[in-house]
Image (spheres, grey):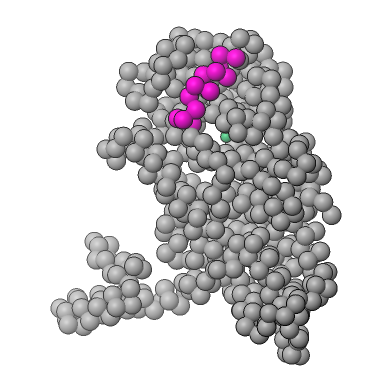
Amino acid sequence: MALQLYNSKTRQKELFKPITEGHVGIYKCGPTVYSDPHLGHARGPIIMDTLKRWLEHSGYSVRLVENVTDVGHLTDDGDAGEDKLQKRAKLEKLEPMEIAEKYFWAYFDAMAALGVQRPDIIPKASGHIPEQIEMTEELIKLGYAYERDGSVYFDVSAWEDYGELSGRNPNDLVEGTRVEVRSDKDDPRDFALWKRAEPEHIMRWNSPWGEGFPGWHIECSVMSTKYLGDEFDIHGGGLDLIFPHHECEIAQARAAGKDFARYWLHWNMITLGGEKMAKSKNHFVTLEDLFKQFDPLVIRFHLLRSHYRSISDFSEESVQSSAQGLKRLLDTYQEVKRLSSGDAADSDAFAALRQAFGDAMDDDLNTPQAIAVLFDATREINTRLSQKPDGPYLNAATMFYEDYLGKIFGVLAANPETAKGDMLDGLLELLINQRQEARLKRDFKTSDAIRDSLAGLGITLEDTTEGSRWKLN
Ligand SMILES: [Zn+2]
């Protein structure tokens, strides 16, 4: 089987054919770097990283570009409000570019912990202002954009294909569009390519239209084509980006005469305990907090257990079950590795399983199916282990795990044991309650002894007004 991918643009699975034989260019919409990375940030990078690993395993050379938005993303996710970085900068009493730097590294450090290999190019929006001005000028020249009082807008009515990606009828879009106070747009559907900077706006650049800053969407049209060519293979992003972000990207680029992406991949969201994550309702979890509870590679494995186009639910229970499953695979891997002797491998022994794994991955990156093949293989290997298999079989089994659990899924170094179970939680709670009781009885000898022995195990207790909290050092 050859790789098939579901293309959001044609709404069907298509045989993947690269523009240039043997090479694949991928663009992924990256984060706006203004706050701590959270669980919602983890899925896309893991999917794109797995796709890249699979393409490379299949013989392609791959260039993966992931942008970082450090200017132009406004608080209303449209053309109104404050720049998200500038708002955060005021809060933390830092320069907006210090905020960008701080959360850039917080994001990429978390991705590294999740086993996500560094993208080949990480362009920043603020580093590509001249190119964004250039595309904006081009769009004005071609009649697809207009200037109003220092801001430049894309003229949706002039671009017939607007709506081609999201499947929305441009005429129906007016109703869904937020009505902005003091908008100078000709049509509420139009979107900003360049915005005039108000006096209080910090991040500003000179342009042919006065001082301002780029709109949120133009950076992706500019940076993807700059590093991957006017036409490139794959564009990835979360489902929530299809409209308006990707619809605007495609309109800008194609109106400027670029063919743009051939395949559009969109991944579904992660729910937390069955509910949509929402920062506004404080229903979300930062990766930093999550990593205290689970090995990041266990989280990676858990996310790969759902197909990227399905919703992936995250709960303590479901991750525990992933950790247990992963432990079964890794235990058998350790056993065959320990017994293998370095003889030649029996290349036929795993041919059918390798075929099944490849078929699953080629079928629109069906990682849950590919993981099922790993469990089938593990059952088979465990049966053989009870029959004292020969060296070539053991070597073939070792290589099977190292190729798929290692090179493709990137979880061979996972430590499923660190997944903190309910039992550990329960034990700690018991100790914390006992210490609390001792303190109430003014028995500080006992309470200090509990605190000190926990500290000896690397667990720090913090006394707060709402009781004691614990954290792993
Ligand atoms: Zn984008």
Q: Position of residue 11 (x, y in %)?
A: 77, 39
Residue at 49 percent across and 66 percent down: it is: 295
Q: Quadrant of residue 251?
A: top right
Q: Quadrant of the N terminus?
A: bottom right
Residue at 76 percent across and 80 percent down: it is: 393
User: Please, is residue 441 above or below residue 297 in the view?
Assistant: below
Q: Position of residue 277 (x, y in %)?
A: 51, 49
Q: Position of residue 78 (x, y in %)?
A: 51, 27
| Residue 310 can be seen, yes or no | no
User: Please, is residue 45 above or below residue 76 in the view?
Assistant: below
In screen coordinates, is 163 left or right of 189?
right
Looking at this rendering, what residue extends furthest in the front direction? 343
Q: Quadrant of residue 301?
A: bottom right
Predominant SS of the magenta segment: helix
Q: Nearer the viewer, residue 427 or 309?
A: 309
Residue at 50 percent across and 53 percent down: it is: 111
| Residue 206 can be seen, yes or no | yes
Q: Which quarter of the frame holds ligand 1?
A: top right
Q: Which residues are magenta?
A: 125-138
Q: Quadrant of the C terminus?
A: bottom left
473 within the magenta span: no
Q: Nearer the viewer, residue 204 or 471?
A: 204
